[in-house]
Amino acid sequence: MILRTNIKCLTCGELYTTRISIGHQSRQEHTFICKSCHEEIKIGLDLDQIKIDWDFECVSNCEVTKEPGHIINFHPELMIPEHLKNSDFVSPFLLQAFNLTKNLPHENPDEDMLKDARFVMNVNNEWPSLKQSWSLKLNKKDILSSKKATEEGNSFRYRVQILDVYEWIYQFSLRILQPKLVHLYDTPMKLMGEIALENPTAFHDFKNFYTTNWLNEHSRKFYNIYSEFFKHFNEFNQIMIYHRNDLGIPESYTVTSTNFNDLKHAYGNIYESYTSCLAFIACLNNLKNKRNFNKFATMDLKKYLSIDKAKRADPFKDVACFSIFSECIDSSLRNASHHGDIELDHTTGIIMYKSGKSKHQNTITYTEYLRKCIDIFTRSVVIFMLELPLTR
Ligand SMILES: [Zn+2]
């Protein structure tokens, strides 16, 4: 269903006719830059998915008007062909339904997996509840945290009984990887299992070290990563369907909501916590190479933890099953965001950021920026899913 509303820019009076496709969340927001005054305009929809009812809201810099204006299309979960983003006749759903099914494998997907994949689309309802249970755990309120997890976690129809927040995070994370990204987790998990079987004593030492020294610190870092990601889920959700199905971003398609002001530090913020937690993978790699978890090829763990975060993936970047954890690291983008050297050109929709001492100018589309954030978030999800079984 497409909802049509005329609005006026409060800064310059430019008129727009918004065509908003209804998604699966209880709230969706869309942000765009006024083509005349280049100020940001934000609109929102509160949705009642059961009664099929909605409330349109002018969130900032606009008001509803009777007069029609420039057409602008929004879809909360799909991209729109670049040349049709201002068309009055486009149906993003019909266009993408064809494109997506064309790319999906024809084997019979597991029915439970499909159910799980659909369920994660309601993530906006589940995350606030999970977040609180996680926060209680971090603040050592274990009983309250588990009470919330058992009472609320089980209402999200998992296939296992949720007994504490770590089980809930694990199951929730698994849904993020479904239907087509579970292999990112399966491969290193299988390897970790082999290491534990081949050298149980060395693995036991690592497990003890992890639960004593890193569990609480990493849990807090992953909490920050998940919080950063779900704060902006509305924007990321425009391309999540392509990501979770392991498909490339379709060429000549674009996202139409562009909330760069809120998102410009997202990659850098996730990067900081993510690169700290890479030590877990580095230790696994040591065990894989039949060394103690804290013995690297050329240094010890203390030295490793003192090296620049941009180099924390170096010990395993060429190891096939661990290289996925280094590919998502873009230190130039992180540095630019950290030093405020990143801007969106409102006329072209291109992000420009400077890197290195030479201040080399890099460019990236907003969609590609979203993709980079999602990639590093997904790798974070995988690392925490590898760590969580060590708490059992
Ligand atoms: Zn304007």
Image (cartoon, grey):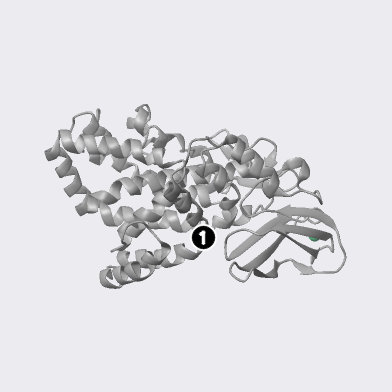
The one of 56 and 228 positioned closer to us in this rendering: 56
Point 58% across, 69% down: residue: 50
Residue 282: quarter of image: top left
Residue drawn at point x = 67 percent, y = 58 percent: 30
Quadrant of the image for the N terminus? bottom right
In the rendered view, does 109 fall on the left or right side of 279? right
| Residue position marked by numbered label 1 in the rendering | 122
**Residue 341 percent location from the top left of the image:** 59, 45
In percent of width and height, residue 248 lies at 57, 36
Q: Is residue 117 above or below residue 357?
A: below
Ligand 1 image-quadrant field:
bottom right
Are there few (<14), some (14-19), or many (20+) residues within 10 Å of tag 1?
A: some
Q: Quadrant of residue 392?
A: bottom left
- Where 320 falls versus 242 (above or below)? above
When the figure is inspected, residue 330 is found, relative to residue 169, above or below; the finding is above
Horizontal relation, residue 18 to residue 255: left or right: right
Q: Is residue 311 left or right of residue 357?
A: left
At 37% across and 41% down in the image, what residue appears? Answer: 185
- The percent coordinates of residue 149 (x first, y second) are 34, 67
Q: Is mark 1 within 8 Å of ligand 1?
A: no
The quadrant where residue 172 appears: bottom left
Front-lying residue, 167 or 272: 167
The residue under the point 56% across, 46% down is 241
Q: Is residue 339 visible?
A: no
